[in-house]
Image: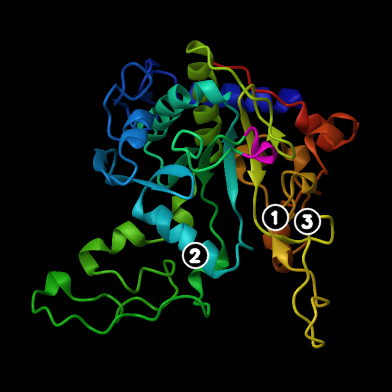
């Protein structure tokens, strides 16, 4: 019930009691990075800096319980701030035809407020020492295209890493290990002889020993539900404090607040309007349906994959229990709804979840 969620949120707050919450404070690590709750003017990751020089690739290091290095990339109509580990994550998803979990937090921002909202949410991302990435649309600002209406409500995206067992097994698209380094300095010897290919993701066996930690991909980098719920509450609070306008919930997403929504964008075979068939034996496109980016009408979990702990450990009724070890990977599946609008017209469990809102702390 909704009371279950509120009880869980109250427990989360009690866990972090004793930490003085101010703008820019990172409850998990006890540090203040951006006292104003947003990137300062002239920051290399700021929206203005991206528009001024989209080809620049600034790198910054932050210290939490480990040193994290972030860099900015501006490609394909987006500006991204991410770690090397996030790029390995994207590589692993690409190599597996985007069929693995692809959970994201979307932030709905009115076009005129995107620059300021980015500076707020990028600061939040860094405050919380997130291990992966965040991106913002820059197509219109850079004159390279128009933000499509079907993506309205997804102006800013924060990646939620969910590990998949397939990342620990080599696939055909993964690169082979490099030959041993000729460098006599042991610190730079290639680590492929010690790491089985596939374990730790597609890059672990390719990295030099002293850099392997940057590229390692495993379940240990998943964050608990309390972490994500606290981040969303703080995001909602900051965006409201700066009077940011929302563009409305993205169609097909699961609303989590005034600005925030959740969606799994793992590809799915689709027989609907946007579907496409593979080339069959006849040479015509009459083969099986291809897996594509899930259309909005497919809902917030079109692939029907296990739900991440941001929901599953705070809303037990949303979880479908699995029977045995053979069904562990599908133990937390939720039947996908069609669209946000249809959720609101439905009196089922999905409708309850679509009406679920977090109150900012």
Q: Which residues are magenta?
A: 148-153
Look at the picture and state if 67 lies above or below 1: below
Q: Is residue 146 above or below residue 213?
A: above
- In the foreground, 209 or 280: 280
Question: In whole angstroms, how far apart are the C-alphas of marks 1 and 2?
Answer: 17 Å
Q: Which residue is mark 1?
A: 305
Label 3 crowd bin: few (<14), some (14–19), many (20+), radius 10 Å: few
Q: Earlier in the sequence, mark 3 or mark 2?
A: 2
Mark in the foreground, 1 or 2: 2
Quadrant housing residue 191: bottom left
Image-based side of 240 in relation to 267, left or right: left
Residue 278 image-quadrant placement: bottom right
User: Where in the figure is residue 107, as x and y percent of width and height?
Assistant: 57, 31
Q: Report the quarter where the N terminus lies.
A: top right
* Residue 167 place in picture, x, y as percent: 51, 67
Instruction: Tell me if label 3 and label 2 are in contact, CB under 8 Å.
Output: no
Q: Which secondary structure lies at badge 2?
A: helix
Quadrant of the snapshot with the C terminus: top right
- Any part of residue 288 in sight: yes
Residue 313 colored magenta?
no
Secondary structure at badge 1 equals: loop
Q: Which residue is mark 3?
A: 274
Count of numbered marks: 3
């Amino acid at each position: 019930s909704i009371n279950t969620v509120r009880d869980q949120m109250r427990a989360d707050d009690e866990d972090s009691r004793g930490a003085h919450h101010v703008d820019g404070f990172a409850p998990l690590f006890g540090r203040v990075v951006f006292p104003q709750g947003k990137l300062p003017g002239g920051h290399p990751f700021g929206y203005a800096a991206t528009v001024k020089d989209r080809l620049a690739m600034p790198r910054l290091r932050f210290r939490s319980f480990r040193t994290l290095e972030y860099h900015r990339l501006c490609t394909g109509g987006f500006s991204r701030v991410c770690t090397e580990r996030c790029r390995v994550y994207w590589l692993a998803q690409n190599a597996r035809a985007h069929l693995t979990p692809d959970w994201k937090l979307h932030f709905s921002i009115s076009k005129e407020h995107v620059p300021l909202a980015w500076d707020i949410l990028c600061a939040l991302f860094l405050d919380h020492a997130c291990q992966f990435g965040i991106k913002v649309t820059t197509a219109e600002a850079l004159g390279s295209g128009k933000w499509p209406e079907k993506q309205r409500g997804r102006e800013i995206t924060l990646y939620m890493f969910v590990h998949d067992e397939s990342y620990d097994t080599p696939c055909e698209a993964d690169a082979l290990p490099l030959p041993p380094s000729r460098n006599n300095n042991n610190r730079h010897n290639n680590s492929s002889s010690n790491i089985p290919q596939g374990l730790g993701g597609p890059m672990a066996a390719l990295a030099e020993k002293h850099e392997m930690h940057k590229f390692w991909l495993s379940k240990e980098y998943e964050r608990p539900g309390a972490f994500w719920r606290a981040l969303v509450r703080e995001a909602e609070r900051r965006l409201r404090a700066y009077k940011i306008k929302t563009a409305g919930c993205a169609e097909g997403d699961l609303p989590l607040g005034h600005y925030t929504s959740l969606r799994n964008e793992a590809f799915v075979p689709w027989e609907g309007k946007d579907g496409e068939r593979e080339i069959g034996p006849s040479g015509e496109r009459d083969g099986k349906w291809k897996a594509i980016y899930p259309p909005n009408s497919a809902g917030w979990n079109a692939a029907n994959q296990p739900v991440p702990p941001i929901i599953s450990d705070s809303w037990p009724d949303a979880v479908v229990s699995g029977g045995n070890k053979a069904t562990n990977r599908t133990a937390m599946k939720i039947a996908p709804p069609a669209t946000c609008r249809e959720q609101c017209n439905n009196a089922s469990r999905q409708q309850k979840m679509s009406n679920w809102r977090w109150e900012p702390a």
